Amino acid sequence: MSKPKPPKKKCCVSKPRCRRCPIRMLKDGTLPPGYTVRKRKLVRTRKQRKRLAKAA
């Protein structure tokens, strides 16, 4: 079984939504942890950014 593809960086605004659309993945609950969608774009959450900055 193959690994699922990651979400796209930006929503293409097509109807019906594609499987990798970040909006669809957020609704379905399949978006990777540490990510969210704002203004139809995939962004990292603040907690995830702080954790990465602290580790570096």
Image (spheres, rainbow, N blue to C red):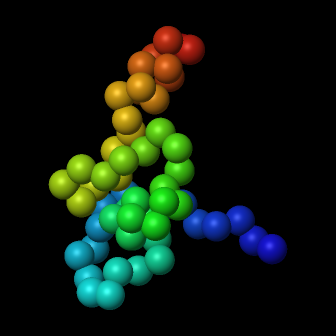
18 vs 7: above or below: below
Q: Nearer the viewer, residue 51 or 56?
A: 51
x 26%, y 83%: residue: 14
x 31%, y 52%: residue: 37
x 37%, y 35%: residue: 45
What is the x, y in percent for residue 50?
42, 19
Specify whether 39 is left or right of 51: left
Residue 16 lies in what quarter of the image? bottom left
Q: How many marks?
A: 0
46 vs 51: above or below: below
Specify whether 32 is left or right of 45: right
Residue 40 lies in what quarter of the image? bottom left
What is the x, y in percent for residue 7?
47, 62
Quarter of the figure that contains the N terminus: bottom right
What is the x, y in percent for residue 4?
64, 67
Specify whether 3 is left or right of 20: right
Single out the residue that lies furthest toward the front: 28
Asked if one can make out residue 42 in the rendered structure from this viewpoint, the answer is yes
Asked if one can make out residue 8 in the rendered structure from this viewpoint, the answer is no
46 vs 53: above or below: below
Single out the residue that lies furthest toward the right: 1
x 47%, y 77%: residue: 19
What is the x, y in percent for residue 47?
41, 26
Single out the residue that lies furthest toward the bottom: 16
